[in-house]
Amino acid sequence: MLDIALKISITLILISILLNAYRLTAGPDMPDRILALDTMYVNSIALIVLMGLWLNTKIYFEAALLIAMLGFISTVAVCKYILRGDIIE
């Protein structure tokens, strides 16, 4: 039962990543593209956690934490760059 639920969840997360990639390339303006990139980070974290559950290993959870930290920092950096034109003041 868990195997079927994981396969369905992985499929749905992959579909959402593809839809995010479309929004990232065809977004009407820059805030939509930033939001699509941030959502893609969250979806990739969910995909990695689901793969860790499916393969029953703990290394995937550490990779998900690393991607979460990098995703947050990069989103903040891009937003500061768009608002102020400079990342480091």
Image (cartoon, helix red, strand yellow):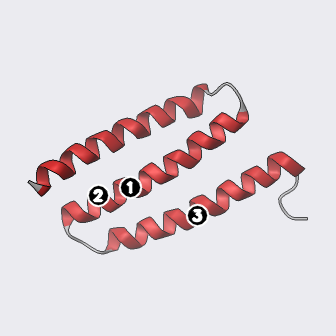
The residue carrying mark 3 is: 70
> From this viewpoint, which residue is outermost toward the left?
1
Of the two numbered discs 3 and 2 in the rendering, the one whose residue sits closer to the viewer: 2
* Crowd tier of the residue under label 3, counting other residues whose Cα lies within 10 Å: few below 14, some 14–19, many 20 or above: few
Which residue is depicted at the point 35% across and 53% down? 47
* Label 2 element class: helix
Instruction: For marks 1 and 2, give the CA distance.
Output: 6 Å
Q: Which mark is drawn over residue 46?
A: 1
Answer whether labels 3 and 2 touch (C-beta < 8 Å): no
For the residues labelled 1 and 2, say whether their Cβ atoms are less than 8 Å apart: yes
Where, by quadrant of the figure, is residue 8 drawn? top left
Looking at the image, residue 7 lies above or below residue 49: above
Residue 11 horizontal/vertical position (percent): 27, 41
Identify whether 89 is placed above or below 41: below
Residue at coordinates 20% horizontally, 52% vertically from top-left? 6
Residue 56 % position (x, y): 20, 69
To which residue does mark 2 refer?
Answer: 50
Q: Which residue is at 38% across, 55% downward?
A: 46
Please state the horizontal and vertical placement of residue 25, each as a whole percent of the image.
58, 30
Vertically, is 24 above or below 28? below
Amino acid beneath label 2: Leu
Q: Amino acid at mark 3?
A: Leu
